[in-house]
Amino acid sequence: MGIYSDIKEDFANAYKNDPALNSKLDFLFNYPGVWAIAWHRVGHRLHTSGHKRLARVVMGLTQIFTHIDIHPAAVIGQRVFIDHGTGVVIGETAIIEDDVVIYQGVTLGGVSLTHGKRHPTVKKGAVIGAGAKVLGNIVIGENAKIGANSVVVKEVPDSSTAIGIPAHVIEKGRCTDPFMHNMLPDINKEMFEYLLKRVAILEHILVEDNKSVLDEDLELEHIYESFIKAMKN
């Protein structure tokens, strides 16, 4: 497909991904992510054809107007949608495949000053939540979901969910609806609940030697071990 066809598809794709879009006029003022992708198509074409300095100028001006920083060398597939978009940063060697959704504040950054591939590869259909930082030459699998404000430094398998700082994969192969952000579990809450229950049980054990309490403690320990095992997997 040519640049014009790709940009036309980017605009049409916004209607699919945002029910708040009601008119074409909205594109002019409320969809910087769409404009950033559109201008990146131009900048990337200039970059690959040898006009690297001009490509940087185009993307520099785009950054001023959209507050989205995309390096012209980054590879972006079809129907990629940046929702809201403010604060998004996409590095030079990043690769984003088709049908990816990226929310505001996301960084696809590097962790090395060496040349070569140092930014993430985001596979088809993945969703990256607001404020997430995906760092290094890692792969985010097809249809994977990254929770908001997570810091991802390890690869995420296909159809999986990763949350936390640093991010842990909590569901492998079970992410059937990547837009259900409200269904993400709260790992910190679960850990605090475990600690509070454990302290209460130990206090009971110190007060009286109760076999039922010991059995309850053993059961809780099994739950904790299962939790840790799931985090490691």
Image (spheres, rainbow, N blue to C red):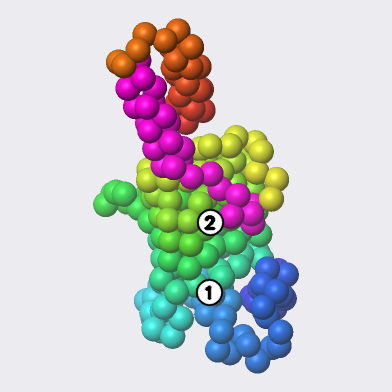
Q: Quadrant of residue 61?
A: bottom left
The image shows residue 162 at horizontal and vertical percentages of 51, 43
The amino acid type, in three-letter code, at marker 1 is: His
Q: Is residue 173 left or right of residue 96?
A: right
Residue lying farthest to the left in this orientation:
113
Q: Residue at x 57, y 80 (%)?
A: 31
Position above or below: 11 against 116: below
Magenta segment: 178-205
Residue 226 lies in the magenta stretch: no
- Taking depth in this image into account, of 71 and 155 the one nearest to the observer is 155
Answer left or right for 87 relative to 222. left
Instruction: Tell me, for residue 18, which label it has, or none.
Output: none
**Front-most of 11 and 188?**
188
Which element carries disc 1, helix, strand or loop? loop
Identity, as a three-letter code, of the amino acid under mark 2: Ile
Image x and y of residue 110, in percent: 35, 53
Return the residue at label 2.
128
Residue receiving disc 1: 84
Left or right position of 26 against 203: right
How busy is the neighbourhood of tag 1: few (under 14 within 10 Å), some, or many (20 plus)? many
Q: Residue at horizontal 63%, vertical 87%?
A: 26
Q: Secondary structure at mark 2?
A: strand
Residue in the image at 42% along x and 56% along y: 149
